[in-house]
Amino acid sequence: MTSQALPNPTPSLADVQRKLGGCLLRLQQYEILLKDVVARSDVAAHPARLQTAQDAQVASAHKKTLGGLVSMLSEQYLTIGDGEDSRDAPQGDDGAYFRVRYQIGLDASRYQTTIAVLKELVALRNELVHHFLLRFNLLQPQGCMAAADYLDASYQRIDGHYQTLLGWANGMVEARKLMAAYVNSEAFENLLLNGVAPDGTVHWPSSGAVRCLREGEARFAIAGWTRLNTTTTWLRTQHPEQQPRRYGCSSWRQIIHECQLFDIRKTVDPVQGHGEVWYRSHQNPQNTQGKNST
Protein backbone atom coordinates (compact mmCIF):
# COMPACT_ATOMS: atom_id res chain seq x y z
CA MET A 1 0.00 0.00 0.00
CA THR A 2 1.13 3.47 -0.68
CA SER A 3 0.46 6.08 1.93
CA GLN A 4 -1.28 9.22 0.90
CA ALA A 5 -1.05 12.56 2.65
CA LEU A 6 -4.19 13.33 4.49
CA PRO A 7 -5.79 16.65 3.60
CA ASN A 8 -5.42 19.40 6.15
CA PRO A 9 -8.52 19.63 8.30
CA THR A 10 -10.66 22.67 7.86
CA PRO A 11 -9.80 25.20 10.60
CA SER A 12 -12.41 25.40 13.29
CA LEU A 13 -13.72 28.51 15.01
CA ALA A 14 -11.40 27.68 17.93
CA ASP A 15 -8.41 27.63 15.55
CA VAL A 16 -9.37 31.04 14.22
CA GLN A 17 -9.77 32.39 17.74
CA ARG A 18 -6.34 31.05 18.71
CA LYS A 19 -4.69 32.60 15.64
CA LEU A 20 -6.44 35.93 16.20
CA GLY A 21 -5.28 35.91 19.81
CA GLY A 22 -1.72 35.26 18.67
CA CYS A 23 -1.83 38.25 16.34
CA LEU A 24 -3.22 40.55 19.01
CA LEU A 25 -0.68 39.41 21.58
CA ARG A 26 2.17 40.04 19.14
CA LEU A 27 0.73 43.47 18.38
CA GLN A 28 0.69 44.27 22.10
CA GLN A 29 4.30 43.14 22.43
CA TYR A 30 5.19 45.40 19.51
CA GLU A 31 3.29 48.34 21.01
CA ILE A 32 4.94 47.96 24.44
CA LEU A 33 8.40 47.86 22.87
CA LEU A 34 7.56 50.80 20.61
CA LYS A 35 6.49 52.90 23.59
CA ASP A 36 9.88 52.33 25.22
CA VAL A 37 11.81 53.17 22.03
CA VAL A 38 9.83 56.34 21.35
CA ALA A 39 9.94 57.56 24.95
CA ARG A 40 13.73 57.24 25.15
CA SER A 41 14.74 58.25 21.63
CA ASP A 42 15.06 61.98 22.35
CA VAL A 43 15.25 63.47 25.84
CA ALA A 44 16.43 67.00 26.58
CA ALA A 45 16.29 69.07 29.75
CA HIS A 46 18.33 70.96 32.28
CA PRO A 47 20.69 68.39 33.89
CA ALA A 48 18.89 68.62 37.23
CA ARG A 49 15.55 67.83 35.53
CA LEU A 50 16.67 65.23 33.01
CA GLN A 51 15.22 62.22 34.88
CA THR A 52 11.95 64.08 35.46
CA ALA A 53 11.74 64.83 31.74
CA GLN A 54 12.45 61.17 30.92
CA ASP A 55 9.73 59.96 33.30
CA ALA A 56 7.24 62.42 31.79
CA GLN A 57 7.98 61.18 28.27
CA VAL A 58 7.53 57.54 29.34
CA ALA A 59 4.17 58.39 30.92
CA SER A 60 3.10 60.33 27.82
CA ALA A 61 4.09 57.50 25.46
CA HIS A 62 2.01 54.99 27.42
CA LYS A 63 -1.10 57.04 26.64
CA LYS A 64 -0.51 57.05 22.88
CA THR A 65 -2.32 54.88 20.35
CA LEU A 66 -0.32 52.70 17.98
CA GLY A 67 -0.92 55.26 15.24
CA GLY A 68 0.39 58.06 17.43
CA LEU A 69 3.45 56.03 18.39
CA VAL A 70 4.23 55.26 14.76
CA SER A 71 3.99 58.96 13.93
CA MET A 72 6.42 59.79 16.74
CA LEU A 73 8.78 57.05 15.60
CA SER A 74 8.69 58.43 12.05
CA GLU A 75 9.35 62.00 13.18
CA GLN A 76 11.90 61.47 15.97
CA TYR A 77 13.73 58.18 15.51
CA LEU A 78 13.82 57.60 11.76
CA THR A 79 15.59 60.21 9.67
CA ILE A 80 16.77 60.73 6.12
CA GLY A 81 20.56 60.65 6.03
CA ASP A 82 22.02 62.32 9.13
CA GLY A 83 18.69 63.97 9.91
CA GLU A 84 17.98 67.50 11.04
CA ASP A 85 17.76 68.90 14.53
CA SER A 86 14.91 71.39 14.56
CA ARG A 87 13.95 70.90 18.19
CA ASP A 88 14.46 73.98 20.37
CA ALA A 89 16.81 73.66 23.30
CA PRO A 90 14.95 73.65 26.63
CA GLN A 91 15.50 76.77 28.71
CA GLY A 92 17.47 76.20 31.90
CA ASP A 93 17.96 78.65 34.73
CA ASP A 94 21.64 78.93 33.86
CA GLY A 95 21.30 78.27 30.13
CA ALA A 96 22.60 74.69 30.49
CA TYR A 97 20.80 71.64 29.18
CA PHE A 98 21.61 68.02 28.45
CA ARG A 99 20.28 66.02 25.53
CA VAL A 100 20.27 62.30 24.77
CA ARG A 101 19.13 61.44 21.26
CA TYR A 102 19.08 58.18 19.30
CA GLN A 103 18.26 57.99 15.59
CA ILE A 104 18.46 55.68 12.59
CA GLY A 105 19.42 57.33 9.33
CA LEU A 106 17.93 55.90 6.14
CA ASP A 107 18.25 56.94 2.53
CA ALA A 108 15.20 58.72 1.11
CA SER A 109 13.81 55.67 -0.68
CA ARG A 110 14.13 53.32 2.28
CA TYR A 111 12.72 55.97 4.60
CA GLN A 112 9.58 56.34 2.48
CA THR A 113 9.20 52.56 2.23
CA THR A 114 9.60 52.13 6.00
CA ILE A 115 7.01 54.81 6.72
CA ALA A 116 4.57 53.18 4.30
CA VAL A 117 4.85 49.71 5.84
CA LEU A 118 4.50 51.17 9.33
CA LYS A 119 1.25 52.80 8.26
CA GLU A 120 0.15 49.45 6.83
CA LEU A 121 0.81 47.88 10.23
CA VAL A 122 -1.47 50.43 11.89
CA ALA A 123 -4.16 49.68 9.30
CA LEU A 124 -3.74 45.94 9.91
CA ARG A 125 -4.11 46.44 13.66
CA ASN A 126 -7.33 48.41 13.13
CA GLU A 127 -8.63 45.73 10.77
CA LEU A 128 -8.01 42.96 13.30
CA VAL A 129 -9.47 44.88 16.25
CA HIS A 130 -12.46 46.57 14.63
CA HIS A 131 -13.42 44.85 11.38
CA PHE A 132 -12.32 41.21 11.52
CA LEU A 133 -15.76 39.74 12.20
CA LEU A 134 -17.27 41.86 9.45
CA ARG A 135 -14.76 40.53 6.93
CA PHE A 136 -15.14 36.79 7.58
CA ASN A 137 -18.17 34.61 8.15
CA LEU A 138 -16.88 32.34 10.89
CA LEU A 139 -20.12 30.33 10.92
CA GLN A 140 -19.12 28.71 7.64
CA PRO A 141 -16.14 26.35 7.07
CA GLN A 142 -14.96 28.38 4.09
CA GLY A 143 -15.06 31.53 6.16
CA CYS A 144 -12.96 29.91 8.89
CA MET A 145 -10.46 28.69 6.29
CA ALA A 146 -10.11 32.16 4.73
CA ALA A 147 -9.82 33.76 8.16
CA ALA A 148 -7.13 31.30 9.26
CA ASP A 149 -5.05 31.96 6.12
CA TYR A 150 -5.44 35.71 6.61
CA LEU A 151 -4.37 35.46 10.26
CA ASP A 152 -1.33 33.32 9.40
CA ALA A 153 -0.17 35.94 6.91
CA SER A 154 -0.99 38.75 9.33
CA TYR A 155 1.05 37.17 12.10
CA GLN A 156 4.06 36.91 9.80
CA ARG A 157 3.77 40.61 8.95
CA ILE A 158 3.37 41.64 12.59
CA ASP A 159 6.25 39.45 13.73
CA GLY A 160 8.46 40.87 10.98
CA HIS A 161 7.78 44.38 12.29
CA TYR A 162 8.45 43.20 15.84
CA GLN A 163 11.81 41.67 14.91
CA THR A 164 12.84 44.87 13.11
CA LEU A 165 11.86 47.01 16.09
CA LEU A 166 13.63 44.63 18.45
CA GLY A 167 16.81 45.11 16.44
CA TRP A 168 16.43 48.89 16.73
CA ALA A 169 15.80 48.62 20.47
CA ASN A 170 18.86 46.40 20.97
CA GLY A 171 20.91 48.93 19.02
CA MET A 172 19.67 51.65 21.36
CA VAL A 173 20.70 49.56 24.38
CA GLU A 174 24.21 49.15 22.97
CA ALA A 175 24.37 52.89 22.27
CA ARG A 176 23.40 53.57 25.88
CA LYS A 177 26.24 51.32 27.09
CA LEU A 178 28.72 53.18 24.91
CA MET A 179 27.39 56.51 26.10
CA ALA A 180 27.59 55.41 29.74
CA ALA A 181 31.22 54.41 29.22
CA TYR A 182 31.93 57.80 27.66
CA VAL A 183 30.10 59.71 30.42
CA ASN A 184 32.33 57.97 32.97
CA SER A 185 35.49 58.79 31.02
CA GLU A 186 38.05 61.51 31.64
CA ALA A 187 37.33 62.94 28.20
CA PHE A 188 33.67 63.55 29.06
CA GLU A 189 34.55 65.03 32.44
CA ASN A 190 36.95 67.42 30.70
CA LEU A 191 34.20 68.39 28.23
CA LEU A 192 31.52 68.83 30.88
CA LEU A 193 33.58 70.63 33.50
CA ASN A 194 36.11 72.46 31.37
CA GLY A 195 34.49 72.84 27.95
CA VAL A 196 37.37 71.00 26.23
CA ALA A 197 36.24 68.62 23.46
CA PRO A 198 38.16 65.39 22.72
CA ASP A 199 39.73 67.04 19.65
CA GLY A 200 41.11 69.84 21.83
CA THR A 201 38.71 72.59 20.77
CA VAL A 202 37.41 74.71 23.63
CA HIS A 203 33.91 76.06 24.17
CA TRP A 204 35.11 79.09 26.08
CA PRO A 205 31.81 80.36 27.57
CA SER A 206 31.35 77.06 29.45
CA SER A 207 35.04 76.46 30.20
CA GLY A 208 36.44 76.09 33.67
CA ALA A 209 39.06 78.73 32.88
CA VAL A 210 36.45 81.41 32.15
CA ARG A 211 34.47 80.45 35.24
CA CYS A 212 37.61 80.89 37.33
CA LEU A 213 38.45 84.25 35.76
CA ARG A 214 34.94 85.49 36.48
CA GLU A 215 35.07 84.19 40.03
CA GLY A 216 38.30 86.13 40.41
CA GLU A 217 36.48 89.21 39.16
CA ALA A 218 33.76 88.77 41.74
CA ARG A 219 36.36 88.54 44.52
CA PHE A 220 39.09 90.96 43.58
CA ALA A 221 37.77 93.61 41.16
CA ILE A 222 38.80 97.22 41.82
CA ALA A 223 36.69 99.83 40.05
CA GLY A 224 35.53 97.20 37.58
CA TRP A 225 39.01 95.84 36.73
CA THR A 226 40.80 92.83 38.21
CA ARG A 227 44.56 92.37 38.47
CA LEU A 228 45.31 89.13 36.59
CA ASN A 229 48.20 88.23 38.91
CA THR A 230 45.88 88.44 41.93
CA THR A 231 43.43 85.99 40.33
CA THR A 232 46.12 83.54 39.19
CA THR A 233 47.76 83.55 42.64
CA TRP A 234 44.40 82.71 44.17
CA LEU A 235 43.75 80.02 41.52
CA ARG A 236 47.00 78.21 42.34
CA THR A 237 45.67 77.44 45.82
CA GLN A 238 41.91 77.19 45.22
CA HIS A 239 41.80 75.59 41.76
CA PRO A 240 45.23 74.06 41.12
CA GLU A 241 43.78 71.78 38.44
CA GLN A 242 43.01 74.82 36.29
CA GLN A 243 46.16 75.26 34.26
CA PRO A 244 46.50 77.11 30.93
CA ARG A 245 48.00 74.02 29.29
CA ARG A 246 44.68 72.21 29.82
CA TYR A 247 43.28 74.61 27.21
CA GLY A 248 46.25 74.53 24.86
CA CYS A 249 47.58 77.86 26.14
CA SER A 250 50.89 78.89 27.68
CA SER A 251 49.53 81.56 30.02
CA TRP A 252 46.37 83.01 31.51
CA ARG A 253 46.84 86.09 29.39
CA GLN A 254 46.70 83.88 26.30
CA ILE A 255 43.45 82.37 27.62
CA ILE A 256 41.97 85.85 27.92
CA HIS A 257 43.04 86.59 24.35
CA GLU A 258 41.76 83.28 22.93
CA CYS A 259 38.36 83.29 24.63
CA GLN A 260 37.55 86.86 23.50
CA LEU A 261 35.24 87.37 26.47
CA PHE A 262 37.27 89.95 28.37
CA ASP A 263 38.83 93.37 27.92
CA ILE A 264 42.46 93.62 28.95
CA ARG A 265 44.79 96.49 29.77
CA LYS A 266 48.32 97.03 31.07
CA THR A 267 49.43 99.48 33.72
CA VAL A 268 52.68 100.19 35.50
CA ASP A 269 52.96 99.80 39.26
CA PRO A 270 53.96 103.30 40.47
CA VAL A 271 55.90 101.91 43.43
CA GLN A 272 57.76 98.92 42.02
CA GLY A 273 57.78 100.07 38.42
CA HIS A 274 56.84 96.76 36.83
CA GLY A 275 53.96 96.19 34.41
CA GLU A 276 50.64 94.76 35.54
CA VAL A 277 47.87 93.14 33.49
CA TRP A 278 44.22 93.84 34.35
CA TYR A 279 41.07 92.31 32.86
CA ARG A 280 37.32 92.68 32.99
CA SER A 281 34.33 90.97 31.34
CA HIS A 282 33.07 92.73 28.24
CA GLN A 283 30.72 95.53 29.22
CA ASN A 284 28.61 95.02 26.06
CA PRO A 285 27.02 91.50 26.14
CA GLN A 286 26.71 91.58 22.33
CA ASN A 287 30.43 92.12 21.89
CA THR A 288 32.21 88.83 21.28
CA GLN A 289 35.58 90.25 20.24
CA GLY A 290 38.31 90.89 22.79
CA LYS A 291 39.61 94.43 23.22
CA ASN A 292 43.21 95.11 24.16
CA SER A 293 44.40 98.44 25.45
CA THR A 294 47.56 99.75 26.98
Image: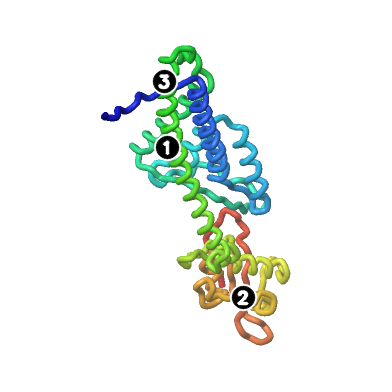
Identify the mark at residue 10; answer none if there is no mark. Answer: 3
Color encoding of the figure: rainbow
The residue indicated by pointer 1 is: 160
* In this picture, residue 87 sits left or right of residue 94: left
x and y percent of residue 269 in the render?
65, 82
Asked if 40 appears above or below 287 in the picture, the reply is above
Front residue (pair 154, 42): 154
Asked if 258 appears above or below 154 in the picture, the reply is below
Asked if 143 appears above or below 152 in the picture, the reply is above
* In this picture, residue 180 sits left or right of residue 59: left
The residue at the point 51 percent across, 32 percent down is 27
Identify the mark at residue 82; answer none if there is no mark. Answer: none
The residue at the point 62 percent across, 69 percent down is 279
| Quadrant including the C terminus | bottom right
Q: What amino acid type is highlighted by mark number 3?
A: Thr
Mark 1 or mark 3, which is nearer to you? 3
* In this picture, residue 286 sits left or right of residue 83: right
Earlier residue among tags 1 and 2: 1
Pick out the residue farthest to the bottom.
272
Mark 3 or mark 2, which is nearer to you? 3
The residue indicated by pointer 2 is: 241
Q: Quadrant of residue 221?
A: bottom right
Q: Residues within 10 Å of mark 3 (few under 14, many from 20)?
A: few
Tell me the SS state at disc 2.
loop
Give the spatial CA distance, label 3 vs label 2.
Answer: 79 Å
Q: Answer yes or no: do the residues labelled 1 and 3 have beta carbons within 8 Å? A: no
x and y percent of residue 95 in the render?
63, 52
Q: Answer yes or no: do the residues labelled 1 and 2 have beta carbons within 8 Å? A: no
Front residue (pair 268, 200): 200
Task: Say if residue 3 shows up in the picture.
Answer: yes
Q: What amino acid type is highlighted by mark number 1?
A: Gly
